[in-house]
Amino acid sequence: MDKKDLEILTLMQSNARLTAETIGHDIGLSPAAVQKRIKKLRDTGVVENEIAVLSPSKLGRDMTVIVQVSLER
């Protein structure tokens, strides 16, 4: 993993829907080179998954609960 891979990962973390063209423009690589690097990052397990972050308030789940459990044997 080199500096360009880390730059790709940084951009992907902020927006996983960025195109290879956009990423390439931002870091100075061709879209094909970006696609190849992203495939390698996925294949080697560096990128495990791309997920959607949901808004709890938009889903009607405005409650935050913090729980601490202590167990003694």
Image (spheres, grey):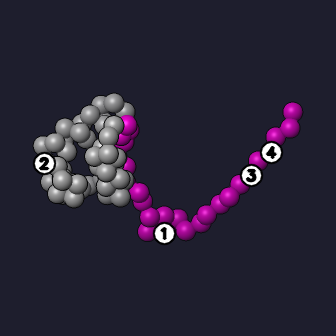
Three-letter code, disc 2 = Ser
Three-letter code, disc 3 = Gln
Asked if residue 39 is positioned above or below residue 56 in the image, the reply reads above
Asked if residue 59 is positioned above or below residue 7 in the image, the reply reads below
Q: Residue at x 53, y 65 (%)?
A: 61
- Find residue 26 and report its image quarter: bottom left
> What residue is disc 4 on?
70
Asked if the stretch drawn in magenta spans residue 68, the answer is: yes
Q: Distance between the residues labelled 1 and 3?
A: 24 Å
Q: Main secondary structure of the magenta part?
A: loop
Of badges 4 and 1, nearer the viewer stands 4
The location of residue 63, given as percent across then percent down, is 59, 66
Secondary element at tag 3: loop
Image side of residue 70 versus residue 61, left or right? right
Q: In this picture, which residue range is highlighted in magenta?
A: 46-73
Of badges 4 and 2, nearer the viewer stands 2
> What residue is disc 2 on?
30
Q: Quadrant of the C terminus?
A: top right
Q: How far apart are marks 4 and 1 (CA)?
A: 30 Å
Image side of residue 69 versus residue 57, left or right? right
> What residue is disc 1 on?
57
Image side of residue 66 versus residue 29, left or right? right
Secondary element at tag 1: loop
Q: Residue at x 76, y 47 (%)?
A: 69
> What residue is disc 3 on?
68
| Mark 1 closeness class: few <14, some 14–19, many ≥20 residues within 10 Å | few
Disc 4 and disc 3 in contact, CB within 8 angstroms: yes
Disc 1 and disc 3 in contact, CB within 8 angstroms: no
